[in-house]
């Protein structure tokens, strides 16, 4: 098996929280009628973390509807033929939607 970087990312609950709480900005516009077809989450910064020979997670910072900023952080990076990235969210210095050790072990 070759060694490579793998990303598990955020838990489903974290994605649902982001969908509910993050500002939406226009995405795709219809070229004919100029109506906004899709909306996307407002990302104000993306930081690349070099974990494995130039590969690694992109950690986004989002702007919430209430003005707060929420960041993706690299919670854990255990080794399984390369680093495996598990992300959680951080808002106001408090971590949310962390992976448990059991959940991490199940996904390795």
Image (tube, helix red, strand yellow):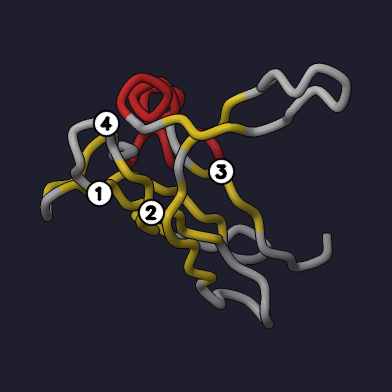
Q: Secondary structure at mark 2?
A: strand
Q: Quadrant of residue 53?
A: bottom right
Q: Nearer the viewer, mark 1 or mark 3?
A: 1
- Which residue in the rendered view is the most extreme toward the bottom? 53
Upstream in sequence: badge 1 or badge 2: 2
Q: Nearer the viewer, mark 3 or mark 2?
A: 2
Dot label at residue 69: 1
Upstream in sequence: badge 3 or badge 2: 3
Question: Label 4 to label 3, Cα distance in Å?
Answer: 26 Å
> Are the residues tagged 1 and 2 within 8 Å (C-beta)?
yes
Q: How would you rate the neighbour count of disc 3 (Cα within 10 Å): few for under 14, some for 14-19, many for 20 or more?
A: some
Q: Secondary structure at mark 1?
A: strand
Q: Is residue 85 above or below residue 20?
A: below
Q: Secondary structure at mark 4?
A: loop
Upstream in sequence: badge 1 or badge 3: 3
Q: Which residue is mark 4?
A: 65
Q: Nearer the viewer, mark 4 or mark 3?
A: 4
Upstream in sequence: badge 4 or badge 3: 3
Q: Which residue is mark 2?
A: 61
| Residue 30: x %, y % from top left | 80, 22
In terms of depth relative to the viewer, which is nearer, 47 or 98? 47
Question: Label 1 to label 2, Cα distance in Å?
Answer: 7 Å
Residue at image location 22% in from the left, 38% down from the top: 96
In terms of depth relative to the viewer, which is nearer, 64 or 49? 64
Question: Label 1 to label 3, Cα distance in Å?
Answer: 22 Å
Q: Secondary structure at mark 3?
A: strand
């Amino acid at each position: 098996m070759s060694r490579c970087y793998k990303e598990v990312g955020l838990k489903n609950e974290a994605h649902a929280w982001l969908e509910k709480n993050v500002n939406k900005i226009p995405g795709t516009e219809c070229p004919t009628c100029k109506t906004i077809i899709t909306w996307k989450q407002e990302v104000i910064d993306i930081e690349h973390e070099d974990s494995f020979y130039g590969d690694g997670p992109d950690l986004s910072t989002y702007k919430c509807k209430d003005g707060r900023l929420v960041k993706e952080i690299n919670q854990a990076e255990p080794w399984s033929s390369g680093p495996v990235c598990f992300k959680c969210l951080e808002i106001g210095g408090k971590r949310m939607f962390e992976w448990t050790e059991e959940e991490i072990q199940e996904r390795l």
